[in-house]
Image: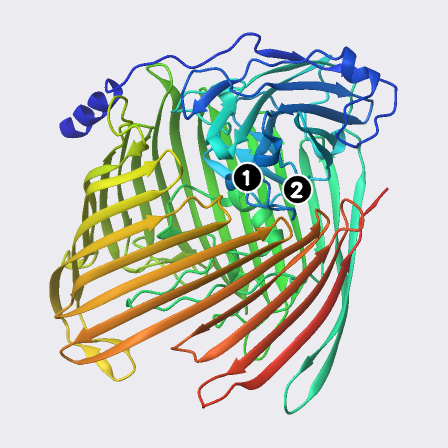
Amino acid sequence: MKGLFFVIGLLMIVECSMAQVSLPNTIYAKYTDDAIQLDGRLDEPVWENAVRISNFTQRELNVGEPATEKTEVAIVYTANTLYIGFWGFDREPDNLVAREMKRDFNWGVEDNFEVIIDTYDDDRNGFLFVINPNGARADAQILNNGRSFNKFWNGVWDTRTAITNEGWFAEIAIPFSTLKFKTNLDQQVWGINFERNIRRKREQLLWQGWSRDSELELVNRAGTLTDLDNIKSKTFIEIKPYSIGGAELTPEKSEGQLNAGGDINYLITPTLRMNLTINTDFAQVEADRQQINLTRFPLFFPERREFFLEGQDYFDMGMGNRIIPFYSRRIGLAEDRSTVPIIAGARVLGKMGNTTLGALSMQTASRDSIPSTNYTVVSWRQDVLKQSSIGILSANKYENGRWHSTTGGYGLYSMSELFGDKNLNIGASFTQNINSDDFDARANAHRIYLSYPNDKVEFDMAWQRSATPFNPEVGFLRRENFQEFYTELEWKPRPKNHFKWIRQFSFKGLDMNYFIFDDTGELQSFFYEIRPLGFETRSGESFEFNLQRRAEGLREPFEITEGIVIPEGEYWYNRMEIQAATFSGRNFALDTYFNWGNFFKGKSTQSAFELSWRTSRYLKIAANYEKNWIDLPEGSFDTDLIGNRIEYAVNPNLFGSLFSQWNSEDEEVLLNFRLQWIPIIGADFFFIVNQAYDTSGNSWTLERTTILGKLIWRFVI
């Protein structure tokens, strides 16, 4: 413990600076009864009379310096809608980086304008809205002062942009019904902040909190939005029915598909929403990206279904990514990732005062040998101190008269103003299995961690344990029966006098994951990495060279591929790794990875390449290839994984993709074609074609084709 406190103290004094505040740090909204034409031209009289703010400061590349391009923002509102005006002056508008138009575009490589609004004014949570010069839209929910980031929240809002010889300009319209806020106040006072990115210069501008140890998502660094008088959150019921039709074709038979269902959303309070879903369907979800497993541990596939992604952060108890008490893919998906029908479900998400609540209950239908099952998850989180919290999570399953629960509690102490603007997080979690047919007090898991995530020095350490009998039946374990000791220290200086073409170095002298079997204390796995050289250039290229020491402790023989078995024993070996990438915002971008060296008692080389070509704002083509060469005393083999993605967009409301993939283990080509049309904001039409081809012979053999059309409409009453 003395060593721990010494490290914490050392990190606290590495760098000392004050949080960045620019005056004025309040923006005043102006009320209007006049209609605003959403066209990006900002030519209505109310925009001329609104108070604009223009005091933007660089966070990158030259922290603390004024913006090189004039940037202004103003806010006006009507009884029902908040309007944000953006003036992005640019002396070289022909060089704007704007190549995407689809909904929820990848804004990290585009010129963009971002707004975060803390409607609760609690310095913890916010709504993020992002646009680019093409009028593409993206949004997200921010929770826990930036520690949780839900990109899959889709609010009802709109924008229009205009590009002229003076730059690019935008109007954003956000209905107050999209924003959750307290209504028992005489006057609304919200937190708000703005960010502009000028990609060709790698310039990032913020209105407030431009410290390198800050970011837009840290809402406690935001400014203030005021003069929002006499607004109310409209109470409404939102009904979103869907209908779906199509067919599944195989060489043996053709089977039609016709279905319907929908969601009902209701605001219980202005900040607490209930969602009911009936005959839930996820036909529009893109296929999982394939993986090749060369380990003895199960593969993890992330959730892709929007319904579950939207509330994902409410059900996170801070146990990291190895012990997951609630894994939403257990609901409606079998072990082989095939679909299990969902009959109905209910969900409540929101915040009441200092309490964040989440509850989810879903009933699945029986299918083949899989019984009908109820899944219920409940989460309670309480704000304490300035940025800290405590909480409880219970994930439950009821099937065939048997009840299983994984229930526990967690706490987080967090601050982002350590010695001015440094970030520090300290947390702990504990969860226990409870079964109706038996109870084992040893069936538990826990985690203790510390994180110092800052710009020049980043330090992390954790200890976690999953006891031998612990089995979260509604969760996921990346490995069982283990204890892990983890620590990482990275130094990331920014050169000032020499190597000015480098934005930031990355040196890592400590990165260790040490796993032991919980029941015996014997070695399970070991990973140690040092990084003698890593850097990112000012133009956006990156490079890493890493040296690795690895070990595996096999308690039983391990079949790494069919016919090749590695004997039990303890294996130590060394490897080297190079990662390099060009700036992903360019028309052509390349990302590469090489890892080579000893592997158990033999050798292996792993490589991966990803190439993307943005032909225009309408079309992007990307391809990836992964190759493994394995040479062991027990035998040699190699693996291949190939993927291709074509993304296209006609306009911000009509876009899609063609995704294909193949790997040498399954010897199956999977094709996924997806078209999405947004006829009005809040409604969607999808056209999907999925095909599978068997390539185990000398030619492609079509196994199945699925063609579906799905319409989701939105009604408000």
What is the quadrant of residue 222 in the picture?
Answer: top right
**Few, some or many residues within 10 Å of mark 2 (<14, 14–19, 20+):** many
The residue at which mark 1 appears reads as: 110
State the CA–CA distance, disc 1 to disc 2: 10 Å
User: Judging from the image, what secondary structure is the residue with disc 2 in?
Assistant: loop
N-terminal of the pair, mark 1 or mark 2, is 1
Mark 2: which amino acid?
A: Ala
Which percent across, then down, holds residue 461? 25, 38
Toward the viewer: 105 or 338?
Answer: 105
Q: Position of residue 203 (x, y in %)?
A: 47, 28
> Which label is found at residue 136?
2
**Front position in the image: 353 or 65:** 65
The secondary structure type at the circle numbered 1 is: loop
Specify whether 469 is left or right of 318: left
Is 712 positioned to the left or the right of 628 in the image? right
> Could you say which quadrant of the image residue 421 lies in?
top left
- Image: 710 above or below 17: below
Q: Is residue 601 left or right of residue 468?
A: left
Residue at left offset 53%, top offset 30% = 197
In the rendered structure, are the residues bearing label 1 and label 2 in contact, judged by CB atoms less than 8 Å apart? yes
Residue at the image point whose x is 80% and y is 42% from the top = 237
